[in-house]
Image (tube, rainbow, N blue to C red):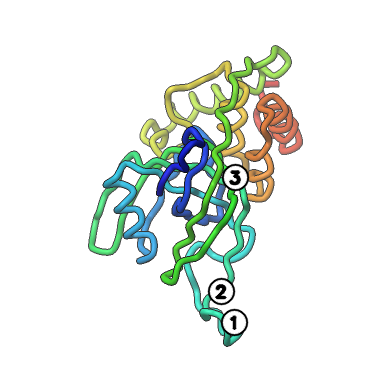
Amino acid sequence: MNSTPGAEALTLSQLPLFPLQTVLYPGGWLPLRIFEVRYLDMIGRCHKAGAPFGVVCLSEGSEVRRLDPAAPPSGDGFAKEVFHAVGTLAHIESLERPQPGLMMIRCRGLQGFDIQRRQQLPHGLWVADVQLRPPEPVVPVPEHLAPTREGLQRLLRSLQERDPTSLEQLPLQPPYQWDDSGWLANRWAELLPAPAELKQRLMTLDNPLLRLELVSDLLDKLGLDNGA
């Protein structure tokens, strides 16, 4: 995985991808259980080099590579995997090997990216040339959306009182940036009981205030604690 010369590290080539049925947001945390051969080697190399990989959300297919009896004879025999063109860089924060052929990792979402070109290697691993999205500006939470922040703060306090150890598994981890509209919208979006397609659309919005407005509306529609 190399930076393209002259692009000021805005472009990455041959970034290994991990298609999932979930959405990783910048600033979010994601635990993963790795057992497929195509990912064990990739994750091991990324961890050793301190390099990120890309998480993309599947729109068709399964997280685990499966044979497809209906696949055409000219293909590789595996079920089709289709994923969105916008994903998030993931940095491995911890890695454990509880037994041979199994890795347990926790990764943190970094910058978003747009896929320019993708390719599936013979053993099934996807790689892509991607352009990194610019870091989001910090937009203060406006007064009319303060209840959305207070609702998440209450939820966090409630979880802490009920089971302090459960916080370690949440995508919501310190440092908390309570006055950043984009950060607040992302953390709520990760916790929402909403389809992955909707979470993907929210993640791709490049206006953090609009994303927070939409999340606040969703909370009202779902009847969830929005601080009202």
Q: How far apart are marks 1 and 3 (CA)?
A: 29 Å
Q: Which amino acid does label 3 sit on?
A: Asp
Q: Mark 1 points at which residue?
A: 71
Q: Mark 1 or mark 3, which is nearer to you? A: 3
Does residue 20 appear left or right of residue 219 in this picture? Answer: left
The local crowd at label 1, few if under 14, some if 14 to 19, many if 20 or more residues have their Cα within 10 Å, is few
Q: What residue type is labelled 2?
A: Ala
Q: Name the residue under label 3.
A: 114
Which of the two labelled residues, at mark 2 and mark 3, occupies the earlier sequence position? 2
Q: Measuring 52% from the left and 55% from the top, which residue is drawn there?
A: 20
Which of the two labelled residues, at mark 2 and mark 1, occupies the earlier sequence position? 1
Q: In which quarter of the image is the C terminus?
A: top right
CB atoms of marks 2 and 1 within 8 Å: yes
Which of the two labelled residues, at mark 1 and mark 3, occupies the earlier sequence position? 1
Q: Measuring 59% from the left and 19% from the top, which residue is drawn there?
A: 138
Number of the label disc, if any, that sits on residue 102: none
Q: Mark 2 or mark 3, which is nearer to you? A: 3
Residue 127 image point, x, y percent = 48, 57
CB atoms of marks 1 and 3 within 8 Å: no
User: Mark 3 falls on what kind of element?
Assistant: strand
Q: Name the residue under label 2.
A: 79
Residue 59 vertical position relative to residue 184 in the rendered view, above or below: below
Q: Measuring 59% from the left and 82% from the top, which residue is drawn there?
A: 71
User: Mark 1 falls on what kind of element?
Assistant: loop
